[in-house]
Amino acid sequence: MFRKNMKKDPELFQNVSEGLRRLYRTKLFPLEDTYRFHDFHSPALEDADFDNKPMVLLVGQYSTGKTTFIRHLMEQDFPGMRIGPEPTTDSFIAVMHGEQDGVIPGNALVVDPKKPFRKLNAFGNAFLNRFMCAQMPNPVLESISIIDTPGILSGEKQRISRGYDFAAVLEWFAERVDRIILLFDAHKLDISDEFSEVIRALKNHEDKMRVVLNKADQISTQQLMRVYGALMWSLGKIINTPEVVRVYIGSFWAQPLLVPDNRKLFEAEEQDLFVDIQSLPRNAALRKLNDLIKRARLAKVQAYIISSLKKEMPSVFGKDSKKKELIANLGEIYLKIEKEHQISPGDFPNLAKMQELLNGQDFTKFAALKPKLLEAVEDMLANDIARLMALVRQEEAAMPSQTVKGGAFEGTMSGPFGHGYGEGASEGIDELEWVVGRDKPTYDEIFYTLSPINGKVSGAAAKKEMLKSKLPNTVLGKIWKLADVDKDGLLDDEEFALANHLIKVKLEGHELPPTLPEHLVPPSKRGIAQED
């Protein structure tokens, strides 16, 4: 009995990476291999794909600041780096951690089993001569790897001169990276035909996509509003989804701002982007799990398509004409499979691309439907993935501090230049005087109109005054909790002033602190607050 149920044993996997690797090899790979998934969609996954660090892919037209963005994150030049207003980066550069500075050329890189790039070999020498890995000891790269890409040019020139399928290479990377950052230049917003094609090629990876509107310090606030609106409109047309892609506005380099009017906005946006990037190591296992599920769903559809085509083929005569007919009617085969197996239309591969790929295939060599292979994948999706999901949560709980450190990420962590330092509830944090004391005379005038008894006003009297702020009761209730330092249900003059100060903080658009910071505790209550 024990032997029979061994497959269902939750202790089957030591960790998420090993679990994913084994599931892929034993359950998904046989289905992919039988129905030629690797010829149509994506090369087989290797061990390095499951073990590698989170990767960030930067994509953009030339001179949008991709390489400068990487340099800004790491605060260090990397081997092979070139920056200029002309199209300088003409290669794919994988910036990774290494003990010493150095460059590994593409041909050597694709034979290294420890690197997740072996399958890029399929794109040929034209691509491999334009691919390299820049290695260097940098704290940022201990947690993530960054892929710099050639700048996308306007017009047809680059399609002829590249010598390899640029969009297909980007799609290969998109499947394997954790974050795709599209960079746009606020100063010259123009989306070329090739860039539109590239964004469409990344269509199945919107969940990984973020947009950076760079060099936003070069234009005025009014112009920035117009550029932002134009960018959202253009992206809406290209990506063609109801959800809006998150756009971060800023100037991502270490130079003075040319137009400093929007400094606070840029700081807040940079902080948000940094938090997003810093979360990648923590969410890496979940991303790999998600990508494997996506891949399994597509592999199932591929099996149904290939086996349906095989079934329709004549055994002796008229094979060529039947093949042409089946390719032409592929849309109808999609509909038939969709209804027969209750598959969502979104799970099917692009029709035109599939028809093009089928032209070069010998249908007689296709495999018939093998239910056992499909059952193994169904079992993986229904049972094994749920167990791995629980393991992901355990790993996350065991390593809560997994985050990207070093470089620009350190500059915004603490001290007076930390995001939000000295603003809102943090105002007066490093002053000797009680910051609320500045406006206390004004608050005292209101306090004494409320007829205090023994130097204190009741909750009902304070409530009437606090409601004039028009803030919701949930917020005012939190302010009351913070301001009633001695928890006696009454407010003295200092506590009343504090309540009004916190109302002002909230009305200015800042968040309230979860507990009262030390510098906001009224001077006469500092002993009480410490005892609490």
Image (cartoon, rainbow, N blue to C red):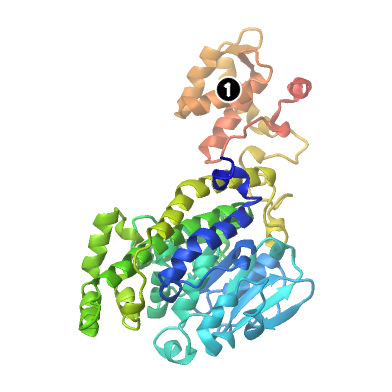
Residue 90, located in which quarter of the rendered image?
bottom right
Q: Residue furthest front?
A: 1
Residue 99, located in which quarter of the rendered image?
bottom right
Label 1 belongs to which residue? Answer: 480
Q: Quadrant of the C terminus?
A: top right
Q: Residue at x 38, y 62 (%)?
A: 370
Q: Quadrant of the N terminus?
A: top right
Q: Residue at x 48, y 88 (%)?
A: 162
Q: Is residue 315 above or below residue 415?
A: below
Residue type highlighted by circle 1: Trp
x, y percentage for residue 345? 30, 59
Q: Residue furthest top?
A: 453
* Pick the front one: 78 or 265: 78
Q: Is residue 525 above or below residue 243?
A: above
**In this orientation, does residue 227 appear?**
yes
x, y percentage for residue 223? 43, 65
Residue 368, located in which quarter of the rendered image?
bottom left
x, y percentage for residue 129? 59, 88
Q: Is residue 66 above or below residue 469?
A: below
